[in-house]
């Protein structure tokens, strides 16, 4: 399989913490970011530029972006719900911004209080702002198609609608789109076929990342399916923290530790030191003693004689 | 993907219960077998013909084989450690017998107290007995290559040794060999390459089944990898019960419920009614209140609008 490079994008600080009521202090989040970057993780979504009254857990996002941007080699990502969020993200120095667009319009209305037309229009305004932003401050703009594999409120979503929204987001000015299995409805067959269908419409370079959950235990099988299709960026959450507070039953991100173990065992290059990564759990366990931390490889330990890839 | 048929082989009554100290009453095991067969599971390994003093939990194996053989359409499997076990399995009416042969000789000595040469010689004696057994009473003879992907005692095991043992087992009279990831050391890349290597030596028809664990969370990803290689029989355990008591840290079979959900969601035909299967957990939960039952799909429930395949 050789040394194909895979980018692991840690989303626990955003997707994990937004679903937890207790507020993790900013200095603990910084410790988490610092430790995970030191373990070799090269992209971290540190928060979301939503109003503090909606998600008080993420109120320190701007401060975290500014902090994380000082770590050499780290891509600092943030979720942005709208144009105002993008302005804040640019001001803080984010390298990558992600605008969620839920394929299920019911979920979109509950989550972002917006119709598809309103989100596409917001994406156009963001695209315009970015084109007017000097290149050295312009973040990479991703449109994330959440509930792309189905939704707890609507059930199955039509593939044609996913493809159409992907095309509209690209026309609006996104650099790329991502597929997100917000509700844990994906399976390896649907992962493979949806990637093919969306890539056929927007091109391979416009779909390189996927955001999978482990709601029904299929997280890593779905990662493998996406890997086989040539996806190179995988979102995951340390300890499997989180889900979506607006999609009932949608708990459980893919566990960063198990995913990195799998990728490393397969001979893929993530640049991550597994032992150091496993150690970052201690920060979470101490900060969130009441939260269950998922993951099997950390419990079982690495196989005897296993050699983890060490960051160069 | 069409309606490719997959055989799910439930091993919880053997691989699950052998690692649990409490003894489940025979009538409860019968209830479990009956309920899982009624849910559409077409193969169940009901126990192991080891001496009762070694594994008192499985002392009722002969009685369970006789009972299970009365269920129409069910293939009744049993583990056999030696020739004497095969005689007992035939007397009870087992349809399939599995002789474990651990690729790690250290594990083999601890688990079966036998060297490779002794196991191959036992396999030859079993092959001879089977050839002399009338066809209507002759069980299907599988040689299971345990620790085929690595071992907690030896670490990595050489592929050449797996292939050589597979060839020796086939020459000894096995109808087929199986690959078993006793210690949870497999990853999707090693699953794919080992299946190819062993099939290249013994032929595709002589390797149709795999026994995977979820020790490091990779169980279903490994199932997917094996599925892609054309494997059609998958061992798993209800609630992920079990592991191997002789391989430290090797807890966690692949969870039957999650695996069946994945296969069904992918459009593969297992003949299993998922709702009925999920209900069988109640029997385990009542009989083994202190044991953790694994599985995510049962907690999250089936996706909205999901249609489970119903047995014909």
Image: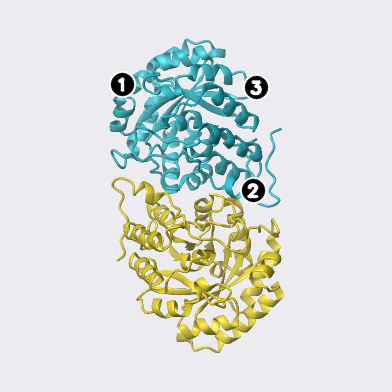
Chain colours: A yellow, B cyan
Q: Quadrant of the C terminus of chain A?
A: bottom left
Residue B34's quadrant in the figure? top right
Q: Secondary structure at mark 2?
A: loop
Label 2 CA crowd tier, 10 Å (few <14, some 14–19, many 20+) = some
**What residue is at 49 percent from the left and 57 percent from the top?**
A254
Residue B22's quadrant in the figure? top left
Q: Nearer the viewer, mark 2 or mark 3?
A: 2
The answer to whether tags 2 and 3 share a subunit is: yes
User: Nearest the camera: A131 or A292?
Assistant: A292
Q: Which residue is mark 2?
A: B302
Mark 2 belongs to which subunit?
B
Label 3 CA crowd tier, 10 Å (few <14, some 14–19, many 20+) = few
**What residue is at 44 percent from the left and 75 percent from the top?**
A76
Between marks 1 and 3, how big is the CA–CA gap? Answer: 37 Å
Q: Are marks 1 and 3 in contact (CB under 8 Å)?
A: no
Q: Which residue is mark 3?
A: B72
Q: Nearer the viewer, mark 1 or mark 2?
A: 2
Number of marks in the image?
A: 3
The answer to whether residue A298 is above or below residue B86 is below
- Residue A211 place in picture, x, y as percent: 53, 62
Q: Secondary structure at mark 3?
A: loop
Q: Secondary structure at mark 1?
A: helix
Relative to residue B119, is residue B260 drawn left or right? right
Q: Quadrant of the N terminus of chain A?
A: bottom left
Sequence-wise, the earlier of marks 1 and 3 is 3
């Amino acid at each position: 399989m050789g040394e194909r490079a895979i980018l692991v994008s840690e989303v626990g600080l955003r997707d994990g913490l937004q679903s937890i009521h207790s507020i993790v202090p900013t200095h603990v989040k910084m410790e988490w970011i610092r430790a995970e970057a030191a373990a070799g993780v090269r992209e971290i979504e540190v928060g979301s530029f939503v109003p503090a009254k909606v998600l008080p857990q993420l109120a320190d996002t701007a401060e975290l972006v500014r902090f994380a941007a000082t770590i050499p080699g780290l891509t600092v990502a943030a979720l942005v719900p709208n144009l105002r969020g993008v302005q804040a993200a640019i001001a803080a120095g984010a390298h990558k911004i992600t605008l969620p667009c839920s394929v299920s319009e019911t979920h979109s209305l509950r989550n972002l209080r917006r119709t598809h037309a309103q989100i596409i229009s917001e994406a156009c305004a963001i695209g315009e702002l970015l084109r007017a932003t000097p290149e050295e401050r312009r973040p990479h703009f991703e449109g994330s198609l959440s509930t792309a594999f189905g939704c707890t409120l609507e059930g199955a979503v039509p593939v044609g609608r996913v493809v159409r929204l992907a095309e509209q987001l690209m026309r609006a000015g996104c650099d790329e789109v991502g597929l997100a299995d917000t509700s844990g409805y994906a399976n390896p067959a649907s992962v493979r076929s949806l990637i093919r269908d969306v890539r056929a419409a927007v091109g391979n370079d416009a779909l390189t990342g996927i955001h999978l959950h482990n709601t029904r235990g299929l997280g890593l099988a779905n990662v493998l399916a996406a890997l086989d299709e040539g996806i190179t960026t995988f979102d995951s959450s340390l300890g499997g923290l989180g889900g979506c507070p607006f999609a009932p039953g949608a708990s459980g991100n893919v566990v960063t530790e198990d995913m990195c173990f799998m990728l490393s065992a397969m001979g893929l290059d993530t640049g991550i030191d597994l032992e150091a990564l496993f150690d970052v759990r201690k920060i979470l366990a101490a900060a969130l003693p009441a939260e269950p931390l998922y993951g099997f490889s950390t419990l079982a330990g690495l196989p005897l004689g296993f050699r983890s890839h060490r960051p160069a």
